[in-house]
Image (tube, rainbow, N blue to C red):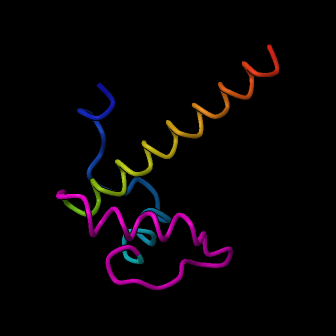
């Protein structure tokens, strides 16, 4: 359901900056988020969707992976 309702456009000012950096290359504002910039660039170049939708999908995937590892850690701690 989430994938069917995902926004194809950035929803924040930082989202537009990330989209621009993913399409044209470059560095984001300080802290730079190098891993996120690299993943965004790869998503825009590899996925067969519009750039905004590609960034939304990679963000959703990143969130799912983070939640998986959080659940794995909590399970390991028996919480």
**Residue at (36%, 57%) from the top-left corner?**
55
**Vertical arrangement, residue 65 with respect to residue 43, above or below:** above
Residue 43 on image: x %, y %: 34, 62
Quadrant of residue 28 within the rendered picture? bottom right
Residue closest to the eye, 30 or 35: 35
Q: Residue at x 61, y 75 (%)?
A: 32
Q: Is residue 34 left or right of residue 8?
A: right
Query: Is residue 72 depicted above or below 26 in this figure?
Result: above
Place of residue 10 in the rendered image (x, y in percent of width and height, measured from the top left): 37, 57
Q: Does the magenta segment cover residue 23?
A: yes
The C terminus is located in which quarter?
top right
Location of residue 4 (image quadrant) = top left
Count up the numbered dots. Answer: 0
Q: Nearer the viewer, residue 62 or 31?
A: 62
Relative to 14, does residue 76 appear above or below in the rendering?
above
Residue plotted at (38% across, 73% down): 22
The residue furthest front is 76
Image quarter of residue 70? top right
Look at 56% across and 66% down and name the residue there.
35
- The segment highlighted magenta reads 22-49
> Residue 51: image x %, image y %?
26, 64
- Using residue 77 as the reference point, say whether residue 65 is left or right of it: left
Q: Quadrant of the N terminus?
A: top left
Asked if the stretch drawn in magenta spans residue 56, the answer is no
């Amino acid at each position: 359901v989430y994938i069917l309702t995902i926004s194809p456009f950035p929803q924040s000012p930082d989202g537009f900056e990330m989209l621009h950096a993913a399409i044209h290359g470059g560095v984001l504002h300080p802290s730079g988020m190098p891993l996120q910039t690299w993943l965004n660039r790869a998503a825009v170049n590899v996925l067969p969707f519009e750039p905004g939708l590609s960034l939304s999908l990679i963000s959703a995937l990143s969130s799912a992976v983070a939640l998986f590892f959080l659940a794995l850690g909590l399970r390991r701690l028996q919480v």
